[in-house]
Image (spheres, grey):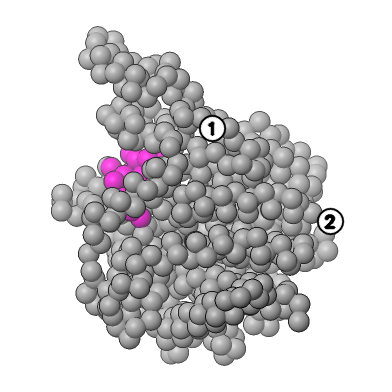
């Protein structure tokens, strides 16, 4: 049997409080692993004042700015100068920092080109070459070339990259896919996990763990034996997500792991810090100030945990969909995260079995058992037979969050956890409730948050389209694909842009909502568009 055939699924109660000393130790480990410039910590009051004064409309701009002198020296200059008559904070910043530009900012579109030609022409503009070490940059240097999303997103992003890779494979750029995989393995080996992005201020969190899916995609596109080189990194990443699981008793939690009362372990999103995110400092700090002192740290940790989910922000994570302060992400067992962990465990089991060195069979069997235990537990708690749909679950009570259905329900289909009946029923629900003129809606609740209606997002379109296709809902998959591509083409012809998100309800409008304007570029939109277009035989 070939390796390609053995790869599977490619394609509550009281919480134990996290030990503060353990959290600080973990954060210190990340700091030591990558000795770099962390702007909010290095600049202290200067960072706070610049962000709160809205010197730049986007908080991320200053987080990415490069000091032109030692940060401590600039802070001293600021302390001496800020009380003097006529002091101009913006002018001070412009004298002392190099302000970053948007990724692919100079790229000029030619709408006479097809959308596919435009995307292929964009790859070089979105590609960053190996980084040099710079002690005055918040960028974590990577040894190989990589593709960034575009606009304000000037660095690699973890889960974005899987969907970008779909298009790179369709473009014949498996060399770039390999370089990005090597970068992620490098981060796992040096930091201990893949951060949200390669910035020092992202070190305390990850993003949805797509590394195993990336390895599977690369193996399928090239020689399947190429996956073996990533086995150690895959197991280390699994250790990161499962840290503390072996010490948990039933109904206890620690960092990213939750042990159910019945015994199985599932995962949640988390962040080791509970201060404002540097890239969204003003927004986080301002909203936190509207809460009682006792509630601020929990709110800030939940904003960060939501950023780890990639869905920042959505009614999916909010106890009150009208109030962002009600985020409860760390209280939730996400159906998509645990589908990803199932895929990761199945991948490790398959690679160990394929390598077949002494001891590999026993390890393979152990990971396979973990995967099946996870699948059984997730299907038991997240599947609603009466509604024919998968839901996130509050781990304290075991309650399915059935008042907020979302496109996350496609993940058990995409990664093959769902039974045939569950796949068919979920596909029917997606068609009836979520399919709109421009593709699948992310949620059914319009809140003004960017991961809610009316927006559609390329990564979720891909999961839903290919997920229902896996369960033989071919007509639905083709219809959703054609609607999404038609929307992409319409906006491209009108604006010359491939954007981060789209309005799937009103195809004449662009996507919106959230903390920043809709971004141009755009890595995962490009990747999914090319991969879906290739299904229709377009060059």
Q: Residue at x 37, y 48 (%)?
A: 29
Q: Quadrant of the C terminus?
A: bottom right
Q: Residue at x 71, y 55 (%)?
A: 167
Q: State the mark number for residue 532.
A: none
Horizontal and vertical percent for residue 372? 50, 83
Question: Measured along the vertical axis of the image, is residue 398 above or below residue 145?
Answer: below
For this view, does 6 lie left or right of residue 202? right
Horizontal and vertical percent for residue 399? 32, 79
For this view, does 140 lie left or right of residue 282? right
**Magenta span covers which residues?**
271-285
Q: Quadrant of the N terminus?
A: bottom right
Q: State the mark number for residue 539.
A: 2
Q: Residue at x 64, y 43 (%)?
A: 144
Q: Residue at x 22, y 15 (%)?
A: 83
Question: Measured along the vertical axis of the image, is residue 249 above or below residue 520?
Answer: below
Q: Give the secondary structure at mark 2.
A: loop
- Identify the residue position indicated by label 1 in the image: 133
Of the image marks 1 and 2, the number of the one nearer the N terminus: 1
């Amino acid at each position: 049997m070939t390796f390609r055939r053995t790869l599977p699924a490619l394609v509550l109660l009281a919480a134990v409080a996290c030990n503060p000393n353990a959290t600080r130790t973990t954060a210190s480990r990340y700091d030591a692993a990558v000795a770099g410039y962390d702007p909010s910590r290095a600049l202290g009051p200067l960072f706070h004042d610049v962000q709160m004064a809205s010197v730049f409309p986007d908080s991320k701009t200053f987080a990415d700015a490069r000091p032109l002198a030692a940060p401590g020296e600039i802070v001293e200059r600021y302390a001496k100068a800020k009380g003097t008559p006529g002091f101009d904070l913006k002018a001070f910043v412009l004298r002392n920092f190099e302000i970053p530009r948007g990724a692919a900012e100079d790229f000029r579109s030619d709408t006479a080109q097809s959308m596919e030609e435009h995307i292929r022409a964009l790859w070089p503009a979105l590609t960053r070459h190996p980084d040099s070490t710079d002690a005055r940059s918040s960028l974590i240097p990577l040894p190989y070339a990589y593709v960034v999303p575009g606009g304000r997103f000037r660095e690699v992003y973890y889960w974005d990259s899987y969907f970008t890779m779909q298009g790179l494979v369709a473009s014949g750029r498996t060399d770039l896919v390999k370089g990005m995989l090597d970068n992620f393995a490098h981060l796992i080996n040096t930091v201990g996990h893949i951060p949200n992005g390669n910035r020092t201020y992202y070190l305390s969190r990850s993003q949805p763990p797509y590394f195993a899916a990336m390895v599977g995609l690369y193996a399928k596109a090239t020689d399947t034996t190429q996956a073996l080189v990533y086995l150690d990194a895959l197991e280390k990443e699994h250790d990161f997500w499962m840290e503390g699981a072996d010490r948990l008793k039933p109904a206890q939690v620690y960092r990213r792991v939750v042990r159910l009362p019945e015994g199985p372990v599932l995962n949640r999103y988390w962040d080791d810090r509970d201060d404002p995110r540097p890239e969204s400092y003003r927004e986080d700090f301002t909203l936190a100030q509207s809460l009682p002192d006792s509630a601020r740290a929990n709110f800030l940790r939940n904003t960060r945990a939501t950023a780890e989910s990639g869905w920042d922000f959505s009614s999916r994570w909010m106890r009150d969909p009208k109030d962002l302060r009600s985020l409860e992400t760390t209280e939730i067992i996400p159906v998509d995260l645990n589908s990803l962990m199932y895929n990761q465990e199945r991948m490790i089991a398959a690679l160990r079995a394929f390598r077949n060195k002494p001891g590999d069979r026993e390890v393979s069997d152990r990971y396979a058992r973990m995967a099946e235990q996870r699948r059984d537990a997730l299907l038991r708690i997240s599947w609603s037979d009466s509604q024919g749909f998968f839901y996130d679950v509050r781990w304290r009570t075991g309650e399915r969050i059935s008042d907020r259905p979302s496109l996350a329900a496609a993940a058990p289909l995409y990664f093959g956890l769902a039974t045939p009946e569950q796949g068919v029923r979920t596909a029917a629900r997606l068609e009836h409730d979520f399919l709109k003129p421009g593709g699948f809606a992310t949620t059914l609740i319009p809140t003004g948050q960017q991961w809610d209606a009316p927006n559609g997002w390329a990564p979720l379109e891909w999961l839903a389209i290919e997920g229902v296709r896996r369960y033989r809902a071919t007509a639905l998959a083709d219809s959703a694909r054609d609607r999404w591509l038609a929307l992409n083409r319409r906006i491209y012809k009108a604006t010359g842009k491939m954007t981060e998100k789209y309005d799937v309800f009103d195809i004449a409008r662009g996507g919106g909502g959230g903390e920043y304007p809709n971004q141009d570029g755009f890595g995962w939109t490009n990747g999914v568009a090319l991969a879906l277009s290739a299904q229709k035989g377009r060059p």
